[in-house]
Each structure stands twice: as C-alpha cells, then as structure tokens.
Amino acid sequence: MEKKVTISDVAKYVGVSKSTVSQYINGNHQKMSADTREKIKKAIEKLNYRPSKQAQFLTTRKSNLIGVVVADISNMYSSLLLKGISQYFEHTNYHLIIVEAANSEIKEQRILQKLVDQNVEGIIIQPSNDNSSNYQFIANNQIPMILVDREIEDSPWLSVTTDNEAIVAKLMQSIVEKSYKNIIVVSQPIHKVNTREKRYNTIADISNANKLNVHLIEVDEAHYIDIKQITEITKTGKTAIFALNGTVLLDIIKLINKNNLIIPNDIGITGFDDFNVTDIISPGITSINQPSKLIGSTVAELLDLILKGTPTNKIDVPTIIKSEIDWRHSL
C-alpha cells in the first residue's frame, strides 16, 4: 500500500517548517513570500497531498462548508438557482452541502440541525414557511443565513428574490386590457409561503379592482387538476389561467392539450416559466422569465461578503432581481 503523504513530507520537500506549510494550507499568507507560497503550492500538487479537513477545523475553527437548502430540487428553478450558487463558490475555498427539504417544515428542521452539527459557516435557504421562530436557533448559533426566492417579513435575515409584485402587476394589466372576465390561479399551497402569497394577492387585488372573478386552485405534489372545474368556469366568460410556478405551468399546458382546448381561443394561459420552453410550445406561451441563475450567484456573493466580515449596511448588492415578460400568443 502506498504511504500517505503527510504535512511533514511537504515541509521536507520544500525545505520549510511544518508550521509554514500549515499556515499556507489555512490561508495565512500575509507574512509569506510569493516564492515560498509558489513552492508549497507546487509541492502539494506534485506529492498529491490532501490536508485533513478535521485537522484544519481544529486549527482554524473554519470548516469551509456552506449549507444550501432548497424546497424542491426537481423544480427547474432550483436547478438553475443551484447552478448560479455553485459557479460562484467554485472560485472560493468553500464547499457546498446541497440538500432538499421537499417543502416539509419538519424535514427542513432536521436538515438545518445537521448543518449546524457539521459546523457550516453559512446557510442559503429557500424557506419552507414564513415562521421566523423556526430559524431562530441558526441565529443563536451565530451562523450567517441568507434567504432566497422567499422572504420572512420582520426577520433579521436578508433575502434575494425577484420583483414578484411588479412583474405580476405588469402581466395582469395586459390580461385586464384583453377583456378577460375570469382568472384561474393555479399553485401549490399558498399559505405561509411568502412568494406565492405575494403573487396571488397581486393578482387578486388587480382582479377585484377591475371586476374580474378570481378562482384559486391549489394542487399537491401530484399536481392533479380536474379539467371539469376549469371548463365550468370558462362557460361563464373569457378565462385565463395564471400558473404561479414553472412546474405547474407545464402541467396545465399538458392538461389543456390533452383535453383538446385551443389556446387562446378556448382559454388563455400564462405564468412563471422556469424551464425556458414556453417559446417552443404552440402557440407560444406568454410567460414570466425569472433570472434564476443570477439570483443564485447574487445570494452566493451576498453570503460571501458577510462571511468576509462586511457589515450588511455597507453591502452594495441588489437583493431584488428583475424578471422579464416574454410576450407571445397565449392570451
């Protein structure tokens, strides 16, 4: 069996002390010459030395671990969000622990406790609900945490979201101008999920102000929808469906096509598109395009700055990222 390379081997190869190599590994380069740093770097690569993470933590009390908790990893929004986060941290010394809470408050609590036990240095979370007391133990452990996609009002945590109310209002104005009488909002359960509540309330407020009828259909993870419920509403006047996320939007489109309804003649359809496929679905679906990857890289940058000790009042990073509407032919 090949002998495992130790820090002593690296020190001997370079001709420096073990303490100097240890300082290099732990990022303490201030009093080290550029020549020494380069020699240690090349020695580590040549000897294929792998420092013990446990030993590093005992020395520095830094794990270099970031916990990332998403609500539903199968949702394309989450995939693009994670891509943005991971690409940012590729250029740092941090490593990601990515976990899914499956929109479960209980599972999320277990995950967060495990992350605390693993001594993560920071957490990025798409919270399952808006109950700030569920996350207080994170603050008690003095672990920086940033919320993404969803907010918790009156909480100490920064959040990075899209401009939900403004972009929904802009799309609703078009629906009003096209003389729709009914709006069917289809979403996963709205209660206690701040983003869904904001989107729905904006739709409801504008609808009520313009005397449109609002119908809410909440779906579970299976996204089952009774087509009869929709067709009965269409009989009462011109109707549009507004899906509050990309997964629901795709399921609605499949349901409409399966039942031979013609878009937009029989029913209008729009919503948030996380899959970037609404331009290839006939007749082209008018949809809200969220910059999910940019949201991910932004929340990563924000956490990185906080971990570097930047006061939150001096961080010049936008926390509301604007979405765009792709205007097509479905309304």
Image (tube, rainbow, N blue to C red):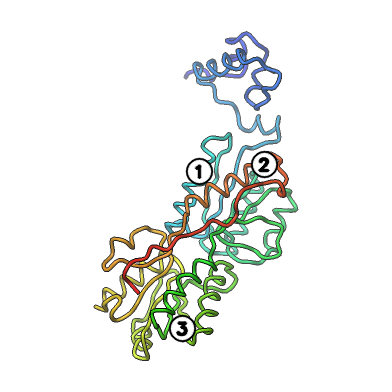
Q: Quadrant of residue 154?
A: bottom right
Which quadrant is home to the C terminus?
Answer: bottom left
Which is in the foreground here, disc 3 or disc 1?
3
Measured along the vertical axis of the image, is residue 180 above or below residue 326?
Answer: below
**Of the residues under marks 3 and 2, which one precedes in the sequence?**
3
Res. 215 mark: 3
Given residues 155 and 279, the one toward you in this image is 279
Measured along the vertical axis of the image, is residue 203 above or below residue 296?
Answer: below
Q: Amino acid at mark 1?
A: Ser
Measured along the vertical axis of the image, is residue 85 above or below residue 276?
Answer: above
**Of the residues under marks 3 and 1, which one precedes in the sequence?**
1
Tell me residue 108's x, y (percent): 59, 59
Tell me residue 170's x, y (percent): 48, 70
In the rendered image, which residue does mark 2 sit on?
Answer: 307
Distance, label 2 to label 1, CA atoms, is 16 Å
Tell me residue 129's x, y (percent): 60, 66
Measured along the vertical axis of the image, is residue 43 above or below residue 275?
Answer: above
- Local crowd at mark 2 within 10 Å, few (<14), some, or many (≥20)? some
In the rendered image, which residue does mark 1 sit on?
Answer: 86
At 41% from the left edge and 72% from the top edge, which residue is drawn? 223
At 48% from the left edge and 71% from the top edge, which residue is drawn? 188
Tell me residue 18's x, y (percent): 67, 16
Label 2 SS: helix
Q: Amino acid at mark 3?
A: His
